[in-house]
Image (cartoon, helix red, strand yellow):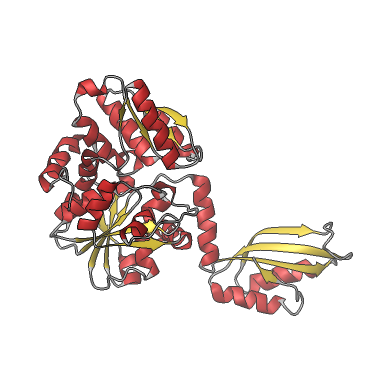
Amino acid sequence: MALVSEPTLADIARARERISPYVHKTPLVRSETFSGMTGSEVYLKLENFQKTGSFKVRGALNKLMTTDRRDLANGVITASAGNHAQGVAYAAMTLGVKATVVMPKWASEAKVNATKSYGAEVLLYGASFDEAAEKAKNMSEQLGMLYIPAFDDDQVIAGQGTIGLEILEDDPDIDYVVVPVGGGGLISGIAIACQGKAEVIGVESEAFPSIHDLLIGKTPSFGSTIADGIAVKNPSQRTLTYIREHVKEIKLVNDDEIAKAVFLLMERQKIIAEPAGAVGLASLLSGDLRLSGKRVAVLISGGNVDLHLLSRIVDHALLDMGRLLIINFVAPDKPGVLSMAVSTIADVGGNIIHIQHERESRDVPIGYSKVKIWMEVPDPSASQEIIKRLSPTFPSITKG
């Protein structure tokens, strides 16, 4: 049974009319690259181009705009790993309301600074989103500020559901909509908006399979993930109910698959997405989500990625795809030996980007040096050829 308060299609339509002066209608663009890679007709819904860099501003605005101004007199408070923080801060600034945001201590500096730039006061607290949320709720009660949930609220859900209306308006023939899932507010709104017109599939990080596991009666266990924006341990009963009723299925992806999707979005589409925003595409590219021949809208839900993390994601993806090679070997400390290795690498098409040369370590025999070389290679076969050619001279050679 759905909750009595479940937002209706009319609620979502009114939310769209309400918030449209303050948000972008983001593009829905066909990807020739990803269509060819998956056998589906892939369309990217680019909420990374939304104000504040993610979809969260939609729900935050709708919540504040449907709240009696008297209840906003002491300001609003929320908890977020980053995107909801910016959404609430922007909405509050737009409507002239004071905002406080509690963010986990590990929240990226870029997201903290962006939240402050919209005029919000930021408090770093807790090792997880859930700890930050508990702190924000306590402060709400103590200080009389209105707490703005990240997902457990029907007005927030209705605001996020406006994305579904835009997708179907731009392409009424869409068969499936693939949506990142954290607490479940985004997918709940989109699924309600799309019911009877398109199937909705959710994607979680396998390190935070909260909704996936709870729906099958399993107690989730948690790890770590680069997709911090969807690292939610405790979804609400509200969103679980809506998802159970309106969502076709929930898929899981790992960090390697997420990193590859982020990388390919940059390289092939010139689009920057944060890891949490790219999990839907990651599932489609992994082959686990098989929608061959179908028209699929994949939501890229945000683009607020820390540049240091983005750099590591690029290196990880290049290594995983066989386009970055790292080799280690012990070499005689004699003139010309390293030059021979470098020439061999160049002959095969490798481009050296860094060399580390060490002779002082205790595990290096006297008269030898430990060498580590980072290089760009055209493809995995070039890596194999380089190792094959160097092995007779450097039998200790290893990758990694």
Q: Residue furthest left?
A: 10
Whether residue 336 is visible to the viewer of this picture, yes or no, is: no
Q: Residue furthest right?
A: 366
Residue toward you, 100 or 93? 100
Residue at the spot x=32%, y=36% of the render? 87
Query: Horizontally, is 191 left or right of 50 in the view?
Result: left
Q: Quadrant of the C terminus?
A: bottom right
Whether residue 314 is visible to the viewer of this picture, yes or no, is: yes
Q: Point out residue 377 in the picture as x, y percentages from the top left corner.
A: 57, 68
Residue at the spot x=18%, y=61% of the render? 198
Q: Point out residue 392 in the picture as x, y percentages from the top left corner.
A: 75, 80
Residue toward you, 38 or 130? 130
Residue toward you, 140 or 356? 140
Query: Horizontally, is 174 left or right of 254 in the view?
Result: left
Q: What is the quadrant of residue 55 in the picture? A: top left
Q: What is the quadrant of residue 358 in the picture? A: bottom right
